[in-house]
Image (cartoon, rainbow, N blue to C red):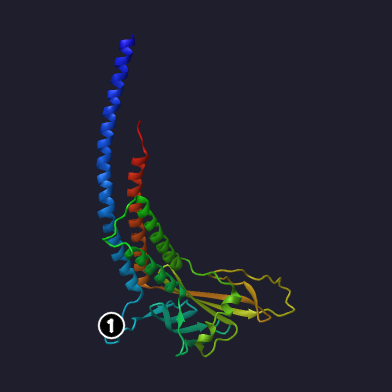
Amino acid sequence: TVMLGAERSNATLSELAKMTAASQAERTVLEEEFNWLLKEEVHAVLKQLQDILKEASRRFSMPSPGLCEGQLKQENFILGSSTMDQVKGVLTLQGEALTQADINIKVAKSSQVMHFAFRDDKQWKLQQIQDARNHVNQALQLLSSRDESYTFKTGAEVNKLMDAVMLQLSRARNRLTTPASMTLPELAASGLVKMFTPPMPGDVMVNFYINLSKLCLTVYQLHVLQPNTTKNFKSAGSSVLHNPGAMFEYNNTKFEVSHVHKVECVVPWLNDTLVFFTISLQLCQQLKDKISVFSSFWNYRPF
């Protein structure tokens, strides 16, 4: 029995040796594949990402056709076209700036139409577009800091870069998909009201914002709450879009929102940029997934 036991343990040892040799060969192949991934494939993906994001960045600053060197393209957008719309407008967008806004508002009570336009010396910066563009450019800077001559040593290093790029792209996308919440007093004090000629009356407020690929205009018609009113006054909180009945106090006067009108139109190039963000985020994630497949092999020991 002693002899049998020794033979059995020898057999087991030789099995183990074979397994080790096989797994060693497998490891060598895996290491070669992984090195190829780090040296070649990562740079191919980075190049692809750069091309897509350069295209996205270009959308934010399209040059104007013709002779105006260095001028950005101006585009007109018509808001509110149906006969039902109480508000109609033409907005001129040039990059991140609204350079002109021409607005007609049908007053609820009297059906008279009020007309307002930006003063010639004024334009309104859309912070959302500016921020999104900055995030795209930061992502591009991160990518260009690792050109073809750079050798990635580890998967973790690639993941770190992908995470940093994805963070910028998520922020860029979030700026376009999530307009800022504002209180009604903030809106009243925003300076937007002072952009127009003739000046807007105290019972009208407007707001412009981006939502996904849409340029939105909201007009609030207000009425003053009399000091002796029996209504329970409750100040409205922060919101992207306030509803009729919302109340607020501004300059010691209490107001209530009586009517809200929202009109919007699609800005095609914003739609393009959102598609570019989605594709880029997917590319980053795919590269991270490939690296995690190799990592799980490395950490998996069958014996």
Please give the residue where the numbered disc 1 appears in the rendered image.
65
Relative to 26, is 252 above or below? below
Q: Nearer the viewer, residue 86 or 280?
A: 280
Quadrant, the C terminus: top left
- In x, y percent, where is residue 103? 47, 83
**Count of marks overlaid on the render:** 1
Q: Quadrant of residue 50?
A: bottom left
Q: Quadrant of residue 228?
A: bottom right
Q: Quadrant of residue 63?
A: bottom left
The outermost residue toward the top is 1
Relative to 226, is 11 above or below? above
Q: Residue at 41% of width from left, 68% of height from top? A: 135
Q: Residue at 55% of width from left, 75% of height from top? A: 260
- In x, y percent, where is residue 83? 45, 78
Relative to 41, is 57 above or below? below
- In x, y percent, where is residue 134? 41, 71
Q: Nearer the viewer, residue 93 or 81?
A: 93
Q: Residue at 51% of width from left, 70% of height from top? A: 180
Determine the secondary structure under disc 1.
loop
**Local crowd size for mark 1, using a 10 Å CA cut-off: few (<14), some (14–19), many (≥20):** few
Quadrant, the N terminus: top left
Amino acid marked by disc 1? Pro
